[in-house]
Amino acid sequence: MGNALSLYAVQGLNYLVPLLLVPYLLRTLGPQSYGTIILAQAVMGYAVTATDYGFTLTAARDISVVRDDAVMVAKIYWTTMAAKAVLLLASFVVIAAVVALTPKLRDFWTVIACCGVLALGNIAFPQWYLQGLERLREAALIQALAKIVSAVAVITLIHSPADLLLAAFILSAHQLAGVAAALCLGQNIAPQRFYMPTATDIRCALVSGWHMFIGSASVTLYGYTNVFVLGIFCGESAVAIYNVAFKIVYALQSLVSPVIQAVYPRASKLFSLSADEGWPLVVRVARLLMPAIAVASVALAVWAPAVVAVVGGRAYLEAVPVLRILCALPICLTASSLLAQCVMVNQGLTRPLVRIYIGVGLLNLVILPGLVWYYAARGAALSLVLAELLGPLLMMRSLDIGRHQLLKQRLPLL
């Protein structure tokens, strides 16, 4: 419970602080400049996805299992960091080539470059390492300070659209700020032991995480792809409208994420013993989260006009129907996170999980262009929700929850 409460603090700041900054940024930068930053971050998000490589789940799980073995923890940590550095370099080369060959992206390549710190920070701050060791209170404190510093910097330094590049840098550097906060607090975010990974170690890490990367990337990428396609088809202002609704919904999702993140290392430990040890924990969490998030999502849909008016102002009321579509997202994400992270990964069902992720990603890619062409931001939202809805349905079928686990564990319908 302490870990969950700690994560509520950090997740609240991860989503609520940026959400609270949105009204200021929309009014200070305007929809065009604000949308440009969001589009640039979506481009750099491909590098974030590549460097994650599924390590967010697999490395956290592996460290959780061997947390009492300092030698193995050091080996996993430094091998993972080295693999991430290789992936980062490759990602930057590919993104630079794509930007150079795409006229629309070349127009704001400097903004994309400033957002590059997003990928650097994603490597530098090892949230997965702290999660695997269940040092979640420390992570909460570090990231809380980083969010506060970033928010103060935005309000102090960003005053007009002329500050576009500085705004892009500050809004993308929150995890680097977390590293600086850790150093100031004297917190170790790396093992005391050092291990020099070999080329074989890095290759083995990449090979072993390949299936999880393909699966997780197929889902994570379409979050960025929806913004990217919307920006290319409809422009930066449409991206700003979409992002207003998206940030509101993810602020709600932040109420769920801490519980799942806190439960994950414990579930990893229990499932490593036996499925009978792990399932009761998942059942208890599902009974807590699913009804609560469903009620909250319905309430958000009802009050959508008022919420959008507060966050974006009356000029962004076009985001209301987008928000109402996206209100189904927290329910889908909660169910899929529980089933994927806490059950399927920990039971070694990565191959069927990969197939599910690929299917979900392909569905989004197939329906996205047409929906965006006809419905703009609403189409991007609808494509995202339909794809996310398919995920938990396929996971339930894969786990045979309907016939077996529901009866065995009295698991509430996810």
Image (cartoon, rainbow, N blue to C red):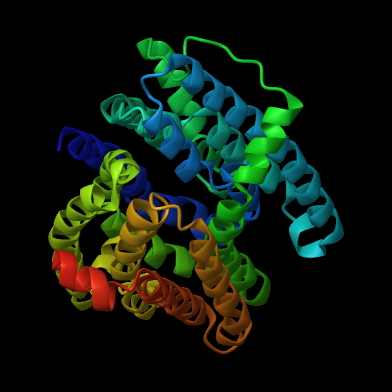
Residue visible at 41% across and 20% down in the picture: 181
Q: Position of residue 239 (x, y in %)?
A: 54, 67
User: Residue 320 or 365: which is nearer the viewer?
Assistant: 365
User: Residue 367 or 302: which is nearer the viewer?
Assistant: 367
User: Residue 138 or 399: which is nearer the viewer?
Assistant: 399
For the C terminus, give its image quadrant.
Answer: bottom left
Please determine whether, in this image, residue 355 is positioned above or below residue 73. below
For the N terminus, give its image quadrant.
Answer: top left
Count numbered badges in the picture: 0
In the image, is 306 to the left or to the right of 359? left
Q: Position of residue 236 (x, y in %)?
A: 59, 66
Please determine whether, in this image, residue 71 is positioned above or below residue 246. above
**Res 223 visible:** no
Residue visible at 43% across and 71% down in the picture: 391
Q: Position of residue 237 (x, y in %)?
A: 55, 68
Q: Quadrant of residue 65?
A: top left
Q: Position of residue 97 (x, y in %)?
A: 84, 51
Residue visible at 85% across and 53% down in the picture: 100
Residue visible at 38% across and 14% down in the picture: 187
Please determine whether, in this image, residue 311 is positioned above or below residue 69. below
Give the residue furthest to the bottom.
374
In the image, is 110 to the left or to the right of 267? right
**Res 143 visible:** yes
Q: Quadrant of residue 154?
A: top left
In the image, is 96 to the left or to the right of 317? right
